[in-house]
Amino acid sequence: MNKQCLVTSVIVAALAAGSGYLYARRQAAPAPTTAAESTAATLAHVQGGAAAHLSSLPGTGGSHGSVITVKDGDSIQDAVARAKPGDTVQILPGTYRQTVYIDKDDIALVGVIRGADWPTFDGEGKRNDAVLYSGNGVRVENLKIVNFKGNAIMGQAGNNFVIRHNWIANAGVYGIFPEFAQNGLIEYNVLTGIEDAAIYVGMSDNIHVAHNEVYGNVAGIEIENSRHAVVEHNLATDNAAGILTFVTPGLPIKTTFDVIIRNNFVVANNHKNFAAVGSIVSGAPSGSGIIIMAAADVIVENNMIRDNKNAGIIVSDHKSFANITPDPETDPNPERIQVLHNLFANNGYEPMKEIRALMAVNLTREGPDLVGVGGGAGSCIADRDSLKILGVVTSWGVCTRTSTADVTNYLLDKPAPPREISTGERGKLIYSSVCAGCHAYNVRMIGPPTQILQVMYAANPQGIADYIAAPVKKRDDFPAMPPQAHLSPELRLAVAQYMLSVNQPKPAPAAP
Amino acid sequence: MFAAAALPATAGAFALSHQCPPSFENREGHCRLQTVYQRYTSLNDAGVGGLKTGLPPVRDGFTPEQIDLGRYLFFDPALSRTGKVACASCHRPSRGFADDRPGVGVTGTAERRKAPSLWNVAFLRRFFWDGRAHSLEEQLKGPLYGAQEMGNRPARLLTTLNGMTAYRALFAEAFTDTGGGIRSDHVYQALAAFESSLISLNSRYDLYAHGVADALSPPEVEGLNVFRSFVARCAECHTPPLFTNQQIAVIGMPEPKGRPFDPGAGAISGEPTLRGGFKVPSLRNVALTAPYGHAGQFATLRDTVAFYTGGRGHAVPSGEKLQLHWHIWEPKLSAGELDRLVDFLDALTDESFRPTAPTGVPSGLPIPN
């Protein structure tokens, strides 16, 4: 069996939908029997196969290196420490009572699922996070993560990530939480029992969230202070609120725009809100299908939105939302929200008191499919006559756009690039920002001045490069130099070459 | 130190260094920052993220002469009304350019807030604990002319400086337009130039961030993982690489015993939900800057990190209704985790580019210690 079959089976199940499907999925693990035993070969297949256009994300880990296998009782962190960029850490079924951090690039952490046996991270209610990463190109797949206090999987500034097919339960505040990232894919995960957002995309760009199932959380999926995100083909049910897109004030990145929420099942999100006191989502009213707060250019299309007791879709500004401290650097209003054709049924049957007050003003006893409160401009609705609408939505225009078919996703065609700096340029940066602290040009500081070293090592940069790898104390009147062996030989040579060139006359340009 | 050695041998004479400080490259007479962090990008150029993330936009491009003139001014008590207080009296170089002893201003009265560290201010967009200033020039007028701090007045300061031959010569070297005498903007720019040269980006943490896995000890890595976890949530506001996201946050720290509640940013904006809000400080060199908090209310880092696990709002005075930041919650950190956090914070120390005090200042006044 390979990943393609798994993917197909999930899609088929999703198409079957309906309450029977929901019920069944809540009883069992996500399609455990269909997942393959992962080998380097099948991993390569995953990269190129299945939902091809989304899964390829070139540059993510594990695509070209070796495989380091970890079995029950081993330390995953030791394997990560040994792994080089491009390597895969393959985790066999077992219980791992560990926290793993990945502070290097292009590493894949991939579980092997045998029958119903998953590699399981157990936080035992006392560990903070299961997986923390800051590297680019990190991939996390096929893990079961339970009983953590903080997050299941949290990334800080790791671009080009893939988080796929993980099963996460009672894993703290967020389940999957990439932050400060560009270009990432979150798909085929199942998350439940999370006390804030199960999938929380924070301050990130170019993100795709697809085919996930989120149930029994405070919020299902949240796109916050992020741009260029598509949320599609997910099932959000039995959360306090299903899918959220917010501008939260007081964060260093101030906007949310270009978000598409389409083809999702947003069903019966009526769970009690069990968020921590003071958290932003504690202000999200239970029974809300989709909430859009102060975001811009959000398109909601072709979702099945039903049985959400408070309202199908809520569009709000900051002022109308509980717990919000205004931020003069953010636009507090939702702007240019487009609600295209969606399927609505039985929403707003038990609305909160603010919505009931709006209903009273509008002389209606029907709760809303779509309600808008507060400021903002340029929003539109495609089929107002077939919807129960309330609040400022009654003044929205008719959308001119009819679909989002022109946008496949907002992922980048190529990985978000690192800042390219030549070895020579890096040598200069290291000389200026590290070496020059002790070796000023013509002034005695902690080490001998660069000017003197230029005479000593004239035309011998390799001499410097070798010396700084393992310095020996040479002069009584200077302290020993700390070794720089952590720099590669090439980089040490580049530093040395730059050091010898500082303030030297440039060679005359070659004759034409 | 970078300038001290450039002093001419002639006693009593002052000359300005023509070398940029370490971590700066002299590009056509202007000092431009050079750091390994320039290898990295940052989402939306915001300068916040994880380990290998670029820095926020930097204030650089001053001349070596302006920076060195700023150094003399920074240490010269002639800038105060009494001739006894210098910038360096409260921004003590040996204390992370912060203050560890309130009440050294011209009146001897304790300021209600602690002088913040000046390390890496070249990257900041907001100044003062309440964030009310938006440039170093705007900020430094506060202490220069504050009655309890240096107590001076603009006209008086210029009379003092223009009355000194040495300063007239130094300003003429650092600026091209001093024909009509030294102006306030010259003074502000030179001080801002010096302050912007205080760069600390070579700690052991930085080495770890650049990929040297054993630069941090195992307890320090453990502390880093507590720091960035979503239980402690430190990194959500003290975000690398500068260890601040430069926002205002209401976190409900207690005031020192017997002191009235400080409304912080709420008093500036008039916005009730910002009452009790303060700027998130950078944690670089934090191990040097005790005591901690906006009023220096915690003696040690251990006491400070313990505040965050004492319960949401536990120190808010009764009768105060504060809208506490959403990241202030009940993380229930263990004693061991708090210790590891302190271990990690110690790894943020780097004063390798700390300039030394001049041996004498142009006014001839004794440099306050």
Image (cartoon, rainbow, N blue to C red):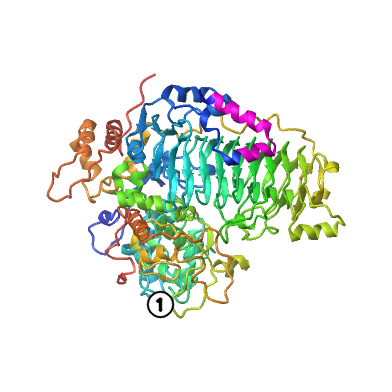
| Foreground residue among A432 and B340 | B340
Above-or-below relation of A149 to B315: above
Left or right position of B296 against B324: left
**Secondary structure beneath label 1:** loop
**Could you tell me what secondary structure mostly forms the magenta stretch?**
helix
Boundaries of the magenta span: A4-24
Left or right position of A455 against A171: left
Whether B27 is among the magenta residues is no
| Foreground residue among B304 and A308 | A308
Residue A56 point in image, percent of width and height: 53, 26
Mark 1 neighbour density, 10 Å: few (under 14) some (14–19) many (20 or more):
many
For disc 1, the chain is B
Left or right position of B286 against A369: left
Whether A6 is among the magenta residues is yes
In the image, what residue type sits under mark 1? Answer: Val
Residue B195 point in image, percent of width and height: 41, 58
| Foreground residue among B172 and B52 | B52
Q: In the rendered image, which quarter is residue A226 located in?
A: top right
Q: Residue at x 39, y 45 (%)?
A: A97
Residue A450 point in image, percent of width and height: 25, 42
Residue B166 point in image, percent of width and height: 34, 64
Asked whether residue B19 appears in the rendered view, the answer is no
